[in-house]
Image: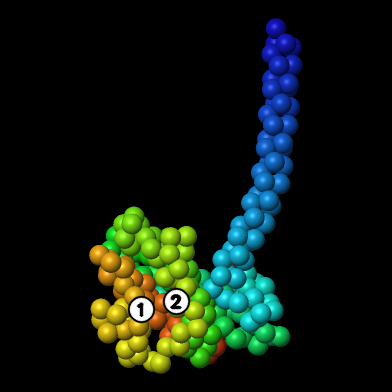
Amino acid sequence: MLKTIRKHGITLALFAAGSTGLTAAINLMTKTTIDEQAAIQQKALFDQVLPADRYNNRLQDRCFVVSAPALGKGEHRVYIAEQDGTPVAAVLETTAPDGYSGAIQLLVGADFSGTVLGTRVTEHHETPGLGDKIELRLSDWITGFSGKKIQGDNDSHWAVKKDGGDFDQFTGATITPRAVVNAVKRAGLYAQTLPAQLPQLPACGE
């Protein structure tokens, strides 16, 4: 009896060890595939806010973590674009905290002279049919930031038309575009300060 129990116990232990090893191997293979797909998707998003011909480094390798009120509460990632080793632009994660239905997460590409190169919304909870027009799949409104230069913090052009600026608001929804315009402006201004900060910024993952 004891011999039989011991035999079954050894069999179960071997089965458990084999299952654990197989699960670990599958997880490792799956994680590699998931990571590769995530990197591809991230690169595709980067290319929407920063023209690929503006830089020749791998953005993910020049990732830094910043805590800056201009980008919103908490930490945000900033990716530095380089041309032959020289920093030329940045892709910044930023938050518009004052959307109609809460915070709006954005990705902003900007050079260091005050020109916004592109903007995309990565997450929002705005009202369907109104504020959700900040999404590229519903409207090309978000593309209107590309190539626009910010002439300092008091640049009156960087506002919705209802506030005397250059950017369209949506019919029945002014709060959402106003929040996005202001967030993009703050991110573009912050980008100008990055070259001086780079030596002190902690890299992602540190």
Residue located beneath label 1 in the image: 167
Residue 181 percent coordinates (x, y): 36, 76
Q: Is residue 37 visible?
A: yes
Residue drawn at x 29%, y 80% as measured from the top left = 161
Q: Which of marks 1 and 2 is nearer the N terminus?
A: 2
Residue 179 visible in the snapshot: no
Can you say whether 129 is above or below 162 in the image?
Answer: above
Secondary structure at numbered mark 1: loop
**Amino acid residing under circle 1:** Phe
140 left or right, relative to 162: right
Is the residue under label 2 in contact with that under label 1 (CB below 8 Å)? yes
Residue 132 in picture, x, y percent from top left:
37, 60
Q: Residue at x 34, y 55 (%)?
A: 128
Label 2 belongs to which residue?
144
Going by the numbered disc 2, the residue's amino acid type is Gly
Q: What residue sits 43% from the left and 64% below the top?
A: 139
In the rendered image, the quadrant that contains the C terminus is bottom right
